Amino acid sequence: MTRSVGGAVVRNTVRRRLRHLVRERLDRLPGGARLVLRVNPAAATLSSAQLAVDLDRALDRAVRQAATP
């Protein structure tokens, strides 16, 4: 996560929030999949609910793209 997201405290807060959200969604990923998240600066200002919606949307898109040859 880059400094554009915010200072160390903000980056670590966003990291913890995302880690918690991803942990609840790991079963949606295919076995052996690797997940890399690129966080935009706006993520620091989102509520947890909105962050979850954005994460769900991104995961759905990634899983769909991985499934199509």
Image (cartoon, rainbow, N blue to C red):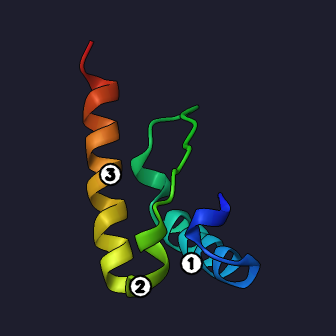
Instruction: Report the residue at 48% width, 68% height from top.
Output: 41
Residue annotated with mark 1: 17
The residue that label 2 is drawn on is 48
Snapshot quadrant of residue 61: top left
Q: Mark 3 to mark 2: distance in Å?
A: 15 Å
Residue 39, given in percent of the width and then of the height, sits at 50, 59
Please provide percent x and percent y for residue 54: 31, 65
Q: Amino acid at mark 2?
A: Ser
Label 1 CA crowd tier, 10 Å (few <14, some 14–19, many 20+): some
Q: Which badge, 3 or 2, is on the more N-terminal residue?
A: 2
Disc ID at residue 58:
3
Tag 3: residue type?
Ala
Q: Secondary structure at mark 1?
A: helix
Q: Residues within 10 Å of mark 3 (few under 14, many from 20)?
A: few
Q: Nearer the viewer, residue 40 or 61?
A: 40
Residue at x-position 49% and y-position 79%: 44
| SS under mark 2 | helix
Mark 1–mark 3 distance (CA, rounded to whole Å): 16 Å
**Which is nearer the eye, 30 or 45?**
45
Front residue of this view, candidates 68 and 48: 48
